[in-house]
Amino acid sequence: MNPSKLRGRDLITTQEWSKEELAYTLDVARSFKKKYRRGSLPQVLKNKTFFMLFYNTSTRTRASFEAAATVLGGHAQFIDFATTRGPEGEAVKDIARMYERYGHGLGVRILESAVNYEYGKGNEILREYAAYTNIPVINMADDMYHPCQGLADVLTIQEKFPRFRGKRYVIMWAYSDRIRSWGSVQEEMLIASRSGIDVTLCYPRGFELDEKIVLQTRKNAEESGSTFEISHEPADAVDGAHIIFPRSWASHECVLTGLNKFGKEREVTIHNKYSNWIMNQNLLDKMNKNAAVMHVLPVFRGQEATDEVMDGAKSLIVEQAENRLHVQTAVLALTMAGKIL
Amino acid sequence: MNPSKLRGRDLITTQEWSKEELAYTLDVARSFKKKYRRGSLPQVLKNKTFFMLFYNTSTRTRASFEAAATVLGGHAQFIDFATTRGPEGEAVKDIARMYERYGHGLGVRILESAVNYEYGKGNEILREYAAYTNIPVINMADDMYHPCQGLADVLTIQEKFPRFRGKRYVIMWAYSDRIRSWGSVQEEMLIASRSGIDVTLCYPRGFELDEKIVLQTRKNAEESGSTFEISHEPADAVDGAHIIFPRSWASHECVLTGLNKFGKEREVTIHNKYSNWIMNQNLLDKMNKNAAVMHVLPVFRGQEATDEVMDGAKSLIVEQAENRLHVQTAVLALTMAGKIL
Amino acid sequence: MNPSKLRGRDLITTQEWSKEELAYTLDVARSFKKKYRRGSLPQVLKNKTFFMLFYNTSTRTRASFEAAATVLGGHAQFIDFATTRGPEGEAVKDIARMYERYGHGLGVRILESAVNYEYGKGNEILREYAAYTNIPVINMADDMYHPCQGLADVLTIQEKFPRFRGKRYVIMWAYSDRIRSWGSVQEEMLIASRSGIDVTLCYPRGFELDEKIVLQTRKNAEESGSTFEISHEPADAVDGAHIIFPRSWASHECVLTGLNKFGKEREVTIHNKYSNWIMNQNLLDKMNKNAAVMHVLPVFRGQEATDEVMDGAKSLIVEQAENRLHVQTAVLALTMAGKIL
């Protein structure tokens, strides 16, 4: 594929990129990972600016995007939305058009808490930025999707399992007393199913995700010849599985009602009923001998999973975090410069 | 003019630079705009740091200054004053002297809210930074002036009207329920009148600006052979005019009393009397056929102006925002490096 | 010494580096200071990232570390801990391992207020970052130590007194109504005594510092053939001394109890008993004719010291602040790149 083909392209969810485009991006990421270690990445962002507009906090996304710009010879501006005129009511279109004139790419993170817990509103605003600017808009996590996480995770799975087709990936709801977005889990389902990985989604009843995205995952699996299953029994779900991602997320009713109206206490009471949904050694022992533990991080240790599991020999969480850098280096080079050399 | 002449110069208000210096800076900005598009800007800030000290929020100023440093091969540090020891009472002179030792230029934004709404105090503090440091201090907007905005706006006017002498520029008070600084409007009057553009200032009685600056504008107009008029009737003011800038600002008494003492509610009540002072298509139709709509942004859509006007074919707001980048690239190259090649 | 020897080394306190390593670092700093002025620093951090994780506010440390990365051709990310997922409870080990994968060095500032005023806890967390990452971890000030300040101050003393052995350095408690950390003062004692400078620590009874560090200072002095004395009488202490550093710090009981439990009002009441402990011209006149006034800044003018003294001819505070840049440029080049050319 010609790298210039992706120049100017937005990345809102991997679902909106073709399989060929995703595969190519992962190839570039693999190549860039080697070049990063050799210190020989192409300086394709020289004098170029990537704006990172954060409505929400971030550990990995910010650090890895800013580092990605640096290793490509460019610069990323970390912009906390709270430090802009945005909170005074400045229009998204005015902000979006402006960044186009000052730089070459725009990342936006906007989660539920930034949009008064109206599910889908974060994604809507992100798309508004994309609509009003010609520079690529990269989703740095919204309330529905998290494409760079999805790409990094598939890269990590492919590194661990070069023959990843037919490997079984369990995304398991896990306990925490905190309220977390559906975005990462949904992106994960979409890209894994589309890549030919068998996906099992396991959660207590009441923790159903976005119906449309579940439907799309099912379609993805059909089209790629993989399987997609839903389970409500962790021990069954993990049995013989190759990959586990233990992750807390908010209940269906809470997300669709909005946390403000639903009430945090009420939601935590629901979570507390499932405080035994923790990824531990016992569950890990039921998995394939060569199994991998993954997590997008931050992981709530002692709630979602035990330290033993997260820090054990099967944990890929550090590799997975590292791969954020490499896929994003690829995404920025392709969308902002259309060049990989 | 020799670019080294401006090396080390502060830019507090355009009024303090000679006409020749301003004209030269605009020439450099025009040249840099072309070079920006070709990716051939001189790397005159290589290894150099421009400190951007923000007492207040910013969308454009921060993004454009940081991008300006990047395209010139340098680096701008975004420093939210709240993250420094300043709020604990560290002396301005100690901060100013320090930045001189660590870098090559210092931008400061300090509006009314940062100085307890004592009009002129922001400018006074800015001048204190300038007094204690030998590196150039650039006003990134204070409670009296906004020189880079003024430069960008004159550049935009000159691009739109290559024969700008005698064109009529209406700065019109416009409604909003928010309280805004006089700085941009005052800078605008000063530099436009000095550039030979006819200026009409139009506002409801009670919204008079800083007397001394009005007087200076009158002098500027006399010296440059342009006109300066004050009107209280929008329909009259815009009649046949070439440029309109619809902008809300705080009432005279409010600013001189200080918003804290004056009271926000009281000020909004005054604004509300003039809620029909909105820049709309009707007013636009009275202007010259080739008229231009400008705004420093953020614009309060639906209050200061209608979307129809702001997004219409005559609106130059995006070009104007872009020109912030180019004039600032010129200002940084000239004041920090004294070089344009 | 071979610069590669320090590659990957943490800098938690200068006490943990050998004398030879400190001397070498200061030599590199002196050489880099000249190269900085000539604009000929080695670009050893090209494409490299130094993460600066700030749990607390900073004026000098942030500006100088970020500038240091810039002049070496690299990039420093300013990360306000509040903008990360850390406050939600993300584990230090997960954060530490991640930065290793995205960059080449990690600075951390963590003072008492960030650790609920449990003395030593800040240092403990900093060491946790260091334990979990292979990239160098640099202490950007914690509740016990401030190594880059110590290095900068010794450099400043050596510049002022090329024959610094036997010169007498008085660290004097000085009044303020604010509560300040022991870190800078303790680092100062350690490195000065180890460098062969005679140290006098002068404070009102009740303001004793960390016992173990006082003991270590005594040992350092013995080993280096310098002296270490404790005084409770400023006029005696400064008599004939060569260097004075007037600095407020919290009382022994307050620090060991924790400010939260001890109470701010109670501590200020203790301070207020010693409001005459101010460094003024009268004390300065008792010092050696060629005496130097130093301060790590911010200085509380009118409390710790008079303006007359801080801005007088004997004050080295601006040089001292500048030297932060040069020692840090040396530390980053040595620990992150292991190269000085």
Image (cartoon, coloured by chain):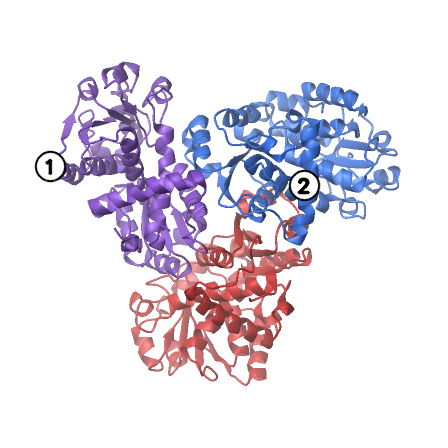
Chain colours: A red, B blue, C purple
Q: Which mark, residue C222?
A: 1
Q: Chain of mark 2?
A: B
Pick the quarter of the image with the N terminus of chain A.
bottom right
Where disc 2 sits, the SS reads helix
Residue B283 higher or lower than C271, as above or below: below
- Type of amino acid at the residue the image marks with label 2: Ala
Q: Quadrant of residue B258?
A: top right
Disc 1 crowd rating (10 Å Cα; few below 14, some 14-19, many 20+) is: some
- Type of amino acid at the residue the image marks with label 1: Glu
In-image side of A15 versus B27 (left or right): left
Tell me whether the residue at label 2 lies in contact with that at label 1, contact meaning CB atoms closer than 8 angstroms.
no
In the rendered image, residues at marks 2 and 1 fall on the same chain: no
Residue A5: % across, % down: 64, 69
- Residue B300 visible: no
Q: Quadrant of residue B281?
A: top right
Query: From mark 2 to mark 1, how far is it between C-alphas?
Result: 63 Å
Residue toward you, C196 or B313: C196
Q: Which residue is label 2 attached to? A: B29
- The number of numbered discs placed on residues in the rendered structure image is 2
Residue A313: % across, % down: 30, 72
